[in-house]
Image: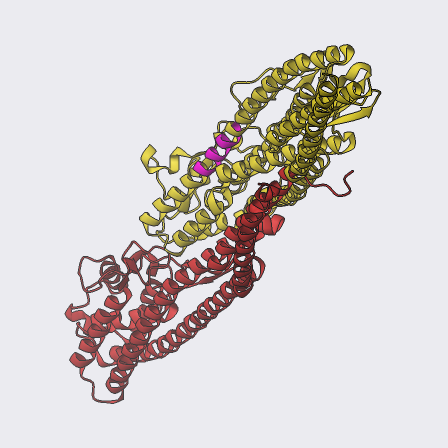
């Protein structure tokens, strides 16, 4: 009787060892899968002999939550830094070569050169060409900003689609887990998939999770909107196909609650959607306003004045849609940077006369400064140069100093963008390190160590050998018994 | 039971991440050691990037001003040269008139000298630099003085008309011999002088503007960098040369000539002094321009060094960093290879 029981224990041991070996081999095969959590076969002793009771999946809630948070923060910052780099390149160009600030100071140089030899018509022409360059820089910059906003809008639309798709997958996996847990099945693989989905979701939006009875999971965004409870909640967004200076982008709604955009260069945005919203609605808009104000400053600085001081100032070298008057002082006009033009009266290719820059009078004889028509009259040219450096009022909506000269204001705009980039760069460094660090910590807590598994395999090999040996010994003993009874 | 645990994935990922970071840093350090400035100046300076761009642009503007100053300096040098010549011919006219006055009255010689002075003077005043008339004020596209010797010139016509108005006959009329000293004095003071010293100069003689060329010589300083043909010395010299050369053509009496010589001597003397005065003023401006250029150059140097201070890096430090990073990367590669080989699998037979 006891021999039979020994044989049965040895058989169970063999079965247990192969079960454990299969877990080990699964662990080894998934060693390089970052979403795989280490499994271990837990043995519990029961008469007769040991039985495998359950397969335990390594998990660390705290580390996992930290990792999700770090992923959101890092993705948000990454989107922000990338967006700022793109904006700098498209608006200001490599080494600020296309920045309005650069173009304006080149115009100032051209004016200076023209003022040194006012009789030279070629220099007049080249000053007007420099003005064309300024206009191009502002027009292109304004266009680039709107394209940038449209791109951000498209990114948001794609992200929202992805997010809805991920939530759909999440529902399937979650249902599988809930049903499996209820029926006592091993749901480890589904749990792995669910964790992987959570990591992907947190790339788009910051989330926090709570697990209810039966392993059912509820996802809430960091803003407090429910993203998933039993069924996925709708994430809605209406994209705008084209952006103009006055276009306001639509919000992203999670279960009817608008998603809060990030703020600052070292952005508070968690997840790429909040960062894209911030880029579209705040950063790009700010840039647009600064360009608009630079344009307004230029129109004002180059306005033609009545030498007798009675008539109002009129648009000179630079004109705009609301010309020939000049825009009201100190107030932002949306889209001015895209609408600023070189006044046709100065433009040789449009039949104008560049020497009006020296003489004045583009708005009629009352505005003529060089009344004698002297070829080397430089006073007006010198005054334009001076006015570019004289402080004027700018709209506080631009977020820059309001009492600056046009040139200083345009340089401030470059400084503003670079300051934001600097904050973003320093934020990115920290957030990337945190994401890597938490991923490492999580992997250390829940990942697989191949060496460890191999050592375990050696143990199992020995156990298997011992069990097999036991069976053969029992077999010998039984056959000895049989022979004795023959 | 595991006390300290590391997953295989974390081990290889950490190595990979570190290596990647070092490679990125190496690329940056390489760029820095080659260019001598931050790899990304914008993120290194932040809000100060605008200031640096402004300084960079200012350097170009200042250099432009230095070039413009060279043009102004050229003009001033040419002006000085011309004024010296005017002073010289003034002196020689003075000498010739003094000789005429003293006793040996060689009418022909004096007249020839005055004519030479007038010709040279017209030539000098109409001299041209880079397509601009030097003495035209800001009216640089119009020839400043007309040729008095051309009978059709407004200057000559006006002079003849004045003579006719005063005496009722022309200069070469035999009646001219009867002009009294008092009449001559009246003619010179009340008829001729207004044509030169007064408003007549600008209607009959000169197309130059009184306004001189204004140049910006530093960012916030302007200077008048030319002289015009309307300078007092030039008017006086022209008056003497014109009257002497023209009136001596006629049969003037000795007493009338005496008056003419007296008046002319005073005026030429004044003219020479006035010309010297104008030269001194031009010299002051010349000096200002050259000082301005020096100041601009030193400003450019200052901006350059400020830019270098803020966005430059120590090239030795960058080079050392590159070397360190290379050594670290070497070690990291070796370690990665070693660690990848380090596996219990190698010992399981």
Q: Is residue A139 magenta?
A: yes
Q: Kindly indicate the quadrant of the structure image that contains residue B133.
A: bottom left
Q: Nearer the viewer, residue B209 or A166?
A: A166
Q: Kindly indicate the quadrant of the structure image that contains residue A293.
A: top right
Q: Nearer the viewer, residue B55 or B155?
A: B55
Picture quarter with the N terminus of chain B: top right
Residue visible at 47% across and 33% down in the picture? A139
Point out the residue furthest to the bottom here.
B103
Magenta region, mostly helix, strand or loop?
helix
Placement of A319 over or under A301, stated as above or below: above
Placement of A126 over or under B255, stated as above or below: above
Q: Is residue B143 left or right of residue A405?
A: left
Q: Is residue B339 left or right of residue A317?
A: right
Q: How is the image coloured?
A: by chain
Q: Is residue B241 left or right of residue A240?
A: left
Task: Please provide percent x and percent y for residue A190.
Answer: 68, 18
Placement of A46 over or under B304, stated as above or below: above
Provide the letter of the chain coloured yellow. Answer: A
Q: Is residue A200 magenta?
A: no
**Does the rendering let one see residue A399?**
no
Q: Colour of chain B?
A: red
Task: Please provide percent x and percent y for residue A258.
Answer: 71, 19
Q: Which residues are magenta?
A: A136-146
Q: Nearer the viewer, residue A211 or B35?
A: A211
Task: Please provide percent x and percent y for residue A29.
Answer: 59, 29
């Amino acid at each position: 009787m006891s021999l039979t029981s020994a044989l049965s224990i040895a058989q169970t041991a063999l079965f247990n060892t192969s079960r454990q070996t299969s877990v080990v081999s699964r662990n080894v095969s998934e060693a390089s899968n970052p979403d795989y959590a280490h499994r271990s076969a837990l043995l519990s002793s029961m008469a007769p002999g040991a039985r495998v009771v359950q397969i335990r999946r390594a998990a660390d809630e705290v580390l996992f939550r930290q990792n999700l948070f770090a992923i959101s923060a890092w993705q948000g910052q990454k989107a922000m830094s990338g967006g700022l780099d793109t904006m700098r390149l498209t608006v200001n160009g490599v080494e600020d070569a296309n920045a309005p600030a650069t173009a304006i100071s080149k115009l100032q140089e051209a004016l200076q050169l023209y003022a040194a030899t006012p009789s030279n018509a070629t220099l007049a022409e080249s000053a007007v060409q420099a003005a064309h360059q300024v206009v191009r820089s502002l027009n292109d910059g304004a266009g680039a900003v709107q394209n940038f906003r449209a791109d951000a809008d498209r990114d948001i639309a794609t992200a929202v689609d992805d997010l809805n798709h991920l939530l759909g997958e999440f529902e399937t996996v979650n249902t599988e887990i809930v049903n499996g847990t209820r029926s006592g099945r091993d749901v480890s693989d589904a749990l792995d998939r669910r964790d992987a989905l959570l990591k992907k979701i947190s790339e788009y939006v910051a989330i926090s999770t709570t697990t209810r009875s039966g392993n059912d999971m509820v996802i809430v965004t960091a803003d407090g909107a429910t993203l998933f409870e039993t069924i996925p909640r709708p994430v809605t967004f209406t994209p705008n196909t084209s952006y103009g200076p006055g276009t306001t982008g639509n919000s992203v709604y999670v279960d009817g609650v608008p998603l809060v955009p990030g703020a600052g260069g070292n952005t508070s945005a968690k997840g790429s959607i909040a960062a894209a919203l911030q880029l579209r609605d705040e950063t790009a808009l700010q840039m647009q306003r600064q360009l608009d104000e630079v344009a307004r400053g230029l129109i004002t600085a180059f306005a033609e004045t009545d030498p007798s001081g009675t008539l109002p100032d009129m648009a000179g070298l630079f004109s705009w849609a609301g010309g020939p008057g000049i825009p009201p002082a100190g107030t932002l006009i949306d889209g001015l940077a895209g609408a600023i033009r070189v006044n046709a009266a100065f433009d040789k290719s449009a039949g104008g006369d560049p020497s009006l820059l020296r003489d004045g009078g583009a708005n009629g004889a009352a505005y003529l400064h060089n009344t004698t028509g002297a070829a080397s009259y430089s006073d007006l040219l010198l005054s334009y140069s001076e006015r570019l450096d004289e402080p004027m009022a700018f709209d506080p909506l631009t977020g820059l100093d309001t009492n600056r000269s046009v040139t200083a204001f345009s340089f401030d705009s470059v400084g503003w963008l670079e300051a934001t980039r600097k904050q973003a760069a320093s934020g990115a460094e920290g957030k990337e390190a945190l994401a890597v660090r938490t991923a490492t910590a999580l992997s250390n807590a829940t990942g697989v160590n191949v060496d460890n598994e191999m050592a375990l395999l050696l143990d199992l090999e020995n156990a298997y050998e011992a069990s097999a040996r036991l069976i053969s010994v029992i077999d010998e003993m039984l056959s000895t018994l049989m022979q004795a009874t023959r | 039971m595991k006390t300290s645990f590391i997953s295989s994935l974390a081990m290889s990922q950490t190595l990979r991440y570190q290596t990647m970071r070092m490679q990125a840093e190496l690329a940056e350090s390489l760029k820095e050691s080659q260019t001598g400035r931050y790899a990304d100046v914008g993120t290194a300076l932040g809000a100060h990037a605008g200031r640096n761009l402004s300084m960079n642009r200012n350097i170009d503007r200042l250099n432009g001003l230095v070039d413009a100053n060279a043009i102004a300096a050229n003009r001033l040098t040419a002006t000085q040269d011309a004024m010296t010549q005017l002073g010289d011919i003034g002196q020689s006219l003075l000498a010739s008139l003094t000789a005429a006055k003293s006793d040996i009255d060689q009418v022909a010689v004096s007249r020839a000298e005055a004519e030479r002075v007038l010709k040279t003077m017209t030539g000098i005043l109409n001299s041209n630099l880079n397509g601009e008339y030097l003495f035209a004020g800001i009216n640089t596209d119009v020839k400043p003085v007309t040729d008095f010797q051309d009978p059709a010139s407004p200057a000559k016509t006006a002079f003849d008309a004045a003579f006719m108005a005063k005496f009722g006959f022309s200069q070469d009329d035999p009646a001219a011999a009867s002009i009294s000293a008092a009449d001559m004095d009246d003619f010179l003071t009340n008829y001729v002088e207004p044509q030169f010293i007064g408003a007549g100069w600008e209607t009959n003689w000169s197309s130059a503007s009184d306004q001189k060329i204004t140049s910006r010589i530093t960012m916030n300083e302007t200077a008048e960098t030319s002289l015009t043909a309307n300078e007092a010395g030039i008017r006086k010299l022209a008056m003497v040369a014109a009257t002497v050369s023209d009136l001596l053509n006629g049969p003037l009496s000795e007493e009338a000539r005496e008056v003419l010589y007296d008046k002319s001597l005073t005026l030429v003397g004044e003219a020479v002094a006035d010309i010297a005065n104008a030269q001194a003023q031009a010299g002051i401006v010349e000096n200002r321009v050259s000082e301005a250029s020096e100041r601009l150059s030193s400003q450019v140097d200052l901006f350059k060094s400020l830019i270098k201070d803020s966005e430059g890096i120590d090239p030795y430090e960058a080079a050392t960093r590159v070397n360190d990073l290379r050594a670290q990367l070497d070690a990291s590669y070796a370690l990665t290879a070693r660690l990848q080989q380090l596996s219990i699998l190698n010992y399981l037979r």
